[in-house]
Image: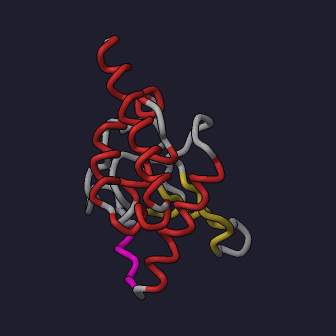
Amino acid sequence: MAHLPSLLSFSLPTVNSFRRMGPGCWTGSTVGWSTEDKEVPLRVCVDLCTRKASNVELKLSDSTANIYLELAMVLSAGMSGLQAKSNLRPMIVPGKNAGDKMPTSLKESLGHLKKNSYLQDVMGPELNKAYIAVREQDAASKESIE
């Protein structure tokens, strides 16, 4: 969960990707998880017969992502939490608690990525520099059009 704002740079890698997320879009707009709630970014689905968790959905992803890079970053983020023995934050309950706000633009998500030394180390210096440069150029060119 701590890496989720940075992960959006990989799972929603274009300016248009961020236009498809937010409240009411079934993607989530806050950092958090829940069961069977379509308005959270990480949704734990429960089997109706057994009442046990059957799968987890990362809802903040689209087809413009490089699936290999995105999956590597998501798995690395999860492993960092396991290695640090981090406690899972409480489940989001509508009307009771809300997570931190998610980035609302590629530029904002890249800002989080630039501060995330763990994910930068996973990518390595060359890929990190190139990836951020390409995404920043894309964000800047799309912003100037609008």
Q: Nearer the viewer, residue 140 or 61?
A: 140
Q: Nearer the viewer, residue 67 or 125?
A: 125
Q: Where is residue 44? Give x, y as percent.
A: 56, 64
Q: Where is residue 46? Give x, y as percent.
A: 63, 66
Q: Residue at x 54, y 58 (%)?
A: 36
Q: Is residue 139 left or right of residue 16?
A: left
| Residue 132, placed above or below residue 98 | above
Q: Residue at x 39, y 69 (%)?
A: 118
> Would you identify the image quadrant in which residue 48 lies?
bottom right
In reply to whether residue 49 is colored magenta, the answer given is no
Q: Residue at x 51, y 63 (%)?
A: 35
Q: Is residue 114 left or right of residue 74?
A: left
Q: Where is residue 78? Give x, y as percent.
A: 50, 72
> Would you identify the image quadrant in which residue 19 lies?
top left
**Which residues are the magenta region?**
86-91
In the displayed orientation, state which residue is furthest to the right. 49
| Residue 81, placed above or below residue 69 | below
Q: Quadrant of the C terminus?
A: top left
Q: Quadrant of the N terminus?
A: bottom left
In the displayed orientation, state which residue is furthest to the front. 126
Q: Is residue 33 left or right of residue 57?
A: left
| Residue 13, placed above or below residue 28 | above
Q: Where is residue 11? Give x, y as percent.
A: 51, 46
Q: Nearer the viewer, residue 82 or 34?
A: 82
Q: Residue at x 34, y 66 (%)?
A: 117
